[in-house]
Amino acid sequence: MKEDIQRVHVQHDDPPSARKVMNSLVADFGRAIVAQDGYALSATISPIPPKNDSGRLYALHRDTNAFSAQSDFRFAITRNPTFRLEKQESNAWIEVFVAYWKAVGEILVAEESLNLGKSATKASGAGALWDKVYAAWKDVLNALYKGYQNGSFEAWTIPCLYVTGKYLRVFAIKADDSAATQKGGAAFNGGYEDDVVDQEGGNEKLEDAARQINRIFGLCISDRAQLAESRKWGLYYITNLLFKTYFRLNSISLSKNILRSLSAIAADMPPLSAFPRSHQVTYHYYVGVIHFLDENYPTAEEHLLAAYSQSLPTSTRNVKLILTYLIPTKLLTSHLLPTPAMLTPYPSLQHLFGPLSTCIKKGDLAGFDAALQAGEDEFVKRRIYLTLERGRDVCLRNLFRKVYLAGGYEAPKEGQEAGEGVRRSRIPLAEFAAALKIAGEKEVEGDEVECLIANLIYKVRPSPCTFAKLG
């Protein structure tokens, strides 16, 4: 198929001025250069066609061929009357667009092969195709990296690094998944929306992508230019991209190296609040999860609350991911539970946390154990099982509180009216033992009951309640 595409390209000999799609692409590039619009500029090297022109990539690749791509792009960029670039910058962008054109060709071949079902008939088909896509897109990143390294590109163009880094990771995952499928096993990385999952090898391309994205991180963090013209403004986006990649690889410890690097240059960085909202929310979420997994729950709560308060209500996926870790965190730090109204918009969270919340509020130990066991696979996948298991102390505390409330009041003392009595302050251990047996605990003896009560006293917290809105 790829040979067929190239054969068509070689057959045409139109002059460079006749390259309509290429000229249109360069016109968009020129408008972005003149306006210094980094996001519009990055759209010209995106592997996803515009919504209003779904055939743009295919048409662009047909506009030239491997022999004349460089000269065609050189003509389109250097002879465009709407903008002028210095020779060094012009050459750097020509190198980027030639690499982009080659990558588009590999992407078209891989996608068309999948659409025609060829991967099902060729044992080495899909994996090899996506390997080529990854290698070609890596060349695009290298061309951009070279341009920044030699000073050809200004800092406002950093959204181009966002696009290349983002899709390098996407193509790496596709290549690794295809390779895993061809070997007869299930595709790797089938986790919960890019979150923490267990991995056992099979991530060769994604590991390489992590190294390449880390190069971009180094390119941004080492920039010595004035802050207004510094690549440091791209740090949090690239940091978030690294977090996603490390989480996917189950190499979360590497994320701490990134945090230490950011901490070391904090004095030279603008405040996090100065960065785009999307960068802030994603950063707070991942830092919160990192501290959650380290069992540093107060710090995890701080970051997860920040992510929750800044996320848009319409971003249901983001809110769901944040609440997945914020709910267990609040359960431990403050004994707070979500209300049914909070969980209703998110059926998956309602399924996970609804039964546990109900049992905790009721002090139903047997129900809590059953709900924890029923959701064990999902809880383990999200790395929240051990945290939720500690919620049993809250459930037990609510059960013992019911014993205290059911005990009634002390008999009025001499001189006291009937309505001035106080609740009993001395409760026999036998009553707590009876409550435990009713709640599903079997063969609980006095010493064990006394130990449970002593531990609860040691872990004193405010009274359990629910929350309708965090923050």
Image: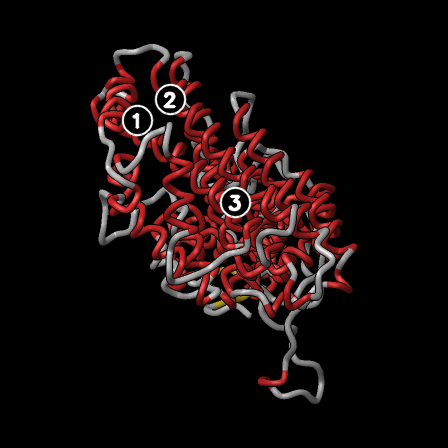
Count of numbered circles on the image: 3
Position of residue 230 relative to residue 210, above or below, is below
Query: Distance from label 2 to label 3 (Cα)?
Result: 29 Å
Q: Which residue is mark 3?
A: 91
- Disc number at residue 125? none
Q: Which residue is mark 1?
A: 109
How did the renderer colour the structure?
secondary structure
Give the class, few, some or many, for how many residues have Cα within 10 Å of label 3's Cα (few <14, many ≥20).
some
Instruction: Please provide percent x and percent y for residue 18.
Output: 24, 44
Q: Secondary structure at mark 1?
A: helix
Q: Position of residue 373 (x, y in %)?
A: 48, 35
Asked if residue 67 shows in the view, the reply is yes
- Pointer 3 and pointer 1: residues touching (CB < 8 Å)? no
Q: Quadrant of residue 314?
A: bottom left
Q: Residue placed at 74% from the left, 50% from the top? A: 261
Residue 230 in which image quadrant: bottom right
What element does badge 3 sit on? helix
Q: Amino acid at mark 1?
A: Val
For disc 1, the neighbor class at 10 Å (few under 14, some 14 to 19, many from 20) is some
Residue visible at 67% across and 54% down? 297
Residue 364 position, x and y percent, is 49, 49
Q: In the figure, is residue 437 to the left or right of 429?
A: left
Q: Nearer the viewer, mark 2 or mark 3?
A: 3
Single out the mark in the foreground, 3 or 1: 3
Sequence-first disc among 3 and 1: 3
Badge 2 amino acid: Leu
Q: What separation in Å lies between label 2 and label 1 (alpha carbons)?
A: 7 Å
Which of the numbered marks, if any, corresponds to residue 129? 2
First in sequence, mark 2 or 1: give its number.
1
Whether the residues at callouts 2 and 1 have beta carbons within 8 Å, the answer is yes
* 357 and 189: which is toward the camera: 189
